[in-house]
Amino acid sequence: MSLDIKVEFSGGLELLFSNQRQHSVTIPSIDPTTSEPTRLQYLINYLRDNLLKERLELFVENDTVRPGILVLVNDTDWELEGEGDYVLKDGDEIVFISTLHGYAGSTIIPGRSIAQ
């Protein structure tokens, strides 16, 4: 059995995913690595391994989304849903929004912005 999940990237993250904001992914309902129901952490790893095209460090850090990325599960902050432990359901909508913004003439370095 599988789950159809709608995924959206914004705030610049779409640039890391073929410049495409919306993706539909089909993943197993049972995580093959744990034999348990598939959790959001599996989806993050799936996106990293299968859809991310560049700059891994701008999406994940320490095996989860990096600080500065807001994650919504069906329009609810993932912190209220258990973060990576949230058990995915068929038809879920997961949105990743980067809140890291630079300004013209700046270089973004994880955790800070330094003018050039």
Image (tube, grey):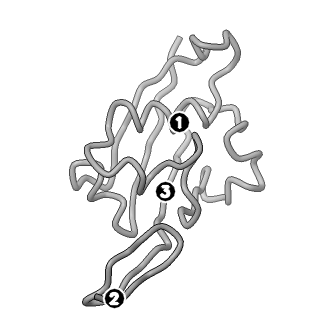
The residue to which callout 1 is attached is 91
- Residue name at image x 45 percent, y 30 percent: 46
Residue count near mark 3 (Cα–Cα under 10 Å), binned few <14, some 14–19, many ≥20: many
Residue at the (46%, 74%) spot, across then down: 100
Q: Are marks 3 and 1 in contact (CB under 8 Å)?
A: no
Q: Is residue 13 above or below residue 100?
A: above
The residue singled out by tag 3 in the image is 96
Specify the quadrant of the image occupied by residue 14.
bottom left
- Quarter of the figure that contains the C terminus: bottom left
Left or right placement of residue 85 versus residue 50 in this view: right
Amino acid carrying label 2: it is Tyr
Along the horizontal axis of the image, is 37 left or right of 33? Answer: right
The residue identified by callout 2 is 103
Which mark is first along the chain, 1 or 3? 1
Q: Nearer the viewer, residue 80 or 68?
A: 68
For label 2, the crowd category at 10 Å Cα-Cα, with few meaning under 14, some 14 to 19 and many 20 or more, is few
Secondary structure found at label 2: loop
Within 10 Å of disc 1 (Cα), the crowding (few <14, some 14-19, many 20+) is: few
Q: Which mark is residue 110?
A: none
3 vs 2, front mark:
2
Q: Earlier in the sequence, mark 3 or mark 2?
A: 3
Residue 56's place in the image compared with 103, above or below, is: above
Q: Nearer the viewer, residue 60 or 112?
A: 112
Q: CA distance from mark 3 to mark 1?
A: 16 Å
- Image coordinates for residue 68, horizontal then vertical, percent: 55, 67
Q: Residue 97 at what x, y percent from top left?
A: 48, 64
- Residue 1 is situated, as x and y percent measured from the top left of the image, at 53, 11
Q: CA distance from mark 3 to mark 2?
A: 21 Å
| CB atoms of marks 1 and 2 within 8 Å | no
* Callout 3 amino acid: Phe
SS for dot 3: strand
Q: Is residue 29 above or below residue 92?
A: above
